[in-house]
Structure formats: structure tokens, C-alpha cells
Image (cartoon, rainbow, N blue to C red):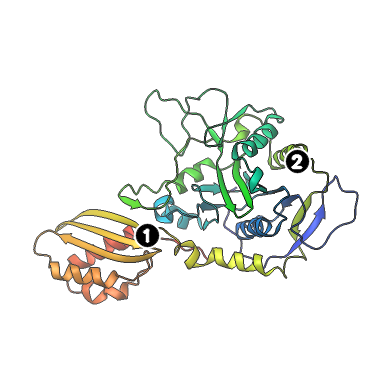
Amino acid sequence: MLRSFPPLPRPRVRLALHKYSTSSTCNQLSPQHAIYVSNSVNPYFNLSLEDWLFRHKNHQEPLLLLYRNTPCVVIGRNQNPWKEVNMSALKARNIPFIRRRSGGGTVYHDLGNTNYSIHLPRASFDRHETAELVRRAISTLGIDVRVNDRNDICVGSEKIRVPGPMCVPAANECFRLYVSGSAYKIVHQRAYHHGTMLISTRLDTLGALLRADKDTMVTKGVDSVRSPVCNLRQFSSTINHETFVDAVIKEFRKEYDIRETVQYVDNGEGVDDIEYIRNGMTELLSWDWAFGQTPEFTYTLKKTLPWGTVTAEIRSKHGVILSAAFAGEGDVSQETLEQLGRRLEGQKYGFVDADIVRDITEQDNRYRDIWDFLSSSMDTYSYRP
């Protein structure tokens, strides 16, 4: 299932009819249908398609979107990617992270995970009810699941004594295994609940990518809640993307009395003229969105080097370094350390060019050691399709 992310194509979409259809094929992508299934696996397209539907659908009518993505990490709107994501692991696997437009925590997508998105009028939006809709759909596939108090979906009626890759429990501590996490967005008269559904996801990759281990990075943004996870496939060998999609569609039809055909979104004609989607894809890839939306944070570092110990405190907001303070042992010049800190002010966190401080690092190997330690601690990864 692991594979490198394909080159980002110019989005082209065609609509095909679901098996319930009795009418002719529609070639024009319209936001006024009720049920959409994207056959694209491009996360930049699917997240932009979701936002376009959310912004343009009649706010009084329900809508369902289902899709999968090639491997990627998706962080919440108000999260810190350096805190949430293992950048080195991302780089090694050539997997992107993407900041979505809704809140909530960080999740991993691959072709073993199916994403659902339920849009409703704000006046009738109830997070628990939409989670229950998905729960009922899974139950029809013969798997016993429950909705917890955060409206995430868990396996079993009792807590299970098995740790998942995202969380290591204390001895004899019980955990319920999660198969789905949720996030929400409310704008004016419209709201949506979207979530992941782990069917046959690479849990080893999920665990590696979502373990950043930066306890001394204190952020004003939203931290993810680490939870033990598992796949639905562990409880049923017959469940897959198609069976899950069909089950959710059937339950959505029943809940909202929907009779119209499903709109399948494929590569082809129909979306080239939709400027909103094109611009949305471009925005998701930009530094301003991916890193520049990062809430303020402070990162405190300490490193013992061959000649002594150095400490650093870096403060950043919106991806830009506001201040950097250093302290070193021995006869390291505090004045030079302050000069190093001033050089970093105003630079993009994780993207500082070594030439900015080269005259300082070439003065003494100790300053070069400090810079090497600092630059490796600010390790980042900017994916380019």
C-alpha cells in the first residue's frame, strides 16, 4: 500500500452515474446533488472538492461525500506541523502533510482508509447523530462499534486491553480501540462532520509518521489526542472500501430520504473551469497555508556537545521566528550567541539558509556545532509533487 505520491495533475473530473441511476450521464460537475463518491485519490483535489461542495451546496439540503487519498498526513486547521508530524519519517517516505480547513487533530490517510463527509444545515446539525449514522452503517456489515463522548467510533462494547500504534498504555490499563476520528466545520448556515475510517490502513506507517516526540515544544494551537487504533479488517475479512461506501450511502439515503443518483467524480472533463477548486489545490500546497498558518509556539532545546552544554529557546508565530535565545557553557561568547539569535529573527522556521549565519559559524567550531544542532532540531519537510 505504501507508494510515492504521484505527480499532481491538473484536476479534470467527469461525473458518472451510480447503479441506482435511471437517467443519462451528467458531464458537468454541480454542487447541487446529494451524494458524491470521488474516484480521485489526490488529497489536494479531494479536500478542495469537499470545501467547494460545502461552500456552494444549498445550505438547507444534506450532502454526503466519500473518498480515499494516497498516503498523506492531514493536520487540523489550528495545529503545529512540527509538533504533530515526524518530519524525518515523512521525508524518508516522500509523503506530504496537508493542513485541512477544519479543526481537530492529525490523522493519516492511505488507500486503506476511507473518508466520509456529511454536510447539513447548521440548524439541524448534530455531531452525535451523524456519528451514529456511520455507526449504523458499519453495524450492517457485521461489526459491533460504538460512538464515544467525542463522537469518535470505537470497536466493541467493552474497553479492549490491546494498545494501538499511536498510544502505549500503562500496565493493566484498558483502552478502547479507535477505528475513526472526527473533525467539524461550521460556517454561517452550513456545517459538516467529516472523519476517517480505518479499514486496512498501514498502521505501522501511521504510528511512525504521527510520533514527533517534541515534548518541549509548547504551542498555542490544538494538540492531537493520542489514541490506540485498529483496522475494521481485523474484525471482518470481507469489509473493504466499496462495502463501506455502499453501507454509508444506504444509511444516508434512509436517514434523509434521498432518492437521487450517486455522482461519481472521475478523471475527465468537468472541473477545469471551476476556479475555486483549482485555487484551493494551489493554496493547500503553498507555504503560506501549510506552515504560515501555524499558531505561536516556543521550543526549548538543550544539547550536550563535546565542549559543553548549550540551551536554546525559539519562539515562532505563523511559521516565522520571532526570537531565538542561546546560552552556552565555557568561554563561548554570549555576545556572539546574541548575534546568532538576531540573525534568525524574521526567518522562516525550518527554512533558514545556512548562509544567513555562515560568518558566525566559521568563527569557531563551537558555533558551527550550535548551528548544526539547531538546524537539525528545526528539521522540516516541504513536499513538492
Tell me residue 273's x, y (percent): 73, 70
Amino acid type, label 2:
Tyr
Residue 256, labelled with which disc?
Answer: 2
Q: Quadrant of residue 231?
A: top right
For the residue carrying disc 2, how many other residues have a C-alpha within 10 Å: few (<14), some (14-19), or many (20+)?
few
**Nearer the observer, 217 or 234:** 217
Report how many numbered discs are placed on residues in the image: 2
Residue at the disc numbered 1: 379
From the viewer's perspective, tell me whether residue 359 is left or right of residue 30.
left
Per the model, the C-alpha gap separating discs 1 and 2 is 48 Å
From the viewer's perspective, tell me whether residue 41 is left or right of residue 357.
right
Tell me residue 266's x, y (percent): 75, 58
Q: Residue at x 27, y 65 (%)?
A: 323
**SS label for mark 1:** loop
Q: Quadrant of residue 134?
A: top right
Tell me residue 203's x, y (percent): 52, 41
**Nearer the observer, 130 or 89:** 130
Q: Which callout, 1 or 2, points at the residue further toward the start of the chain?
A: 2
Amino acid type, label 1:
Asp
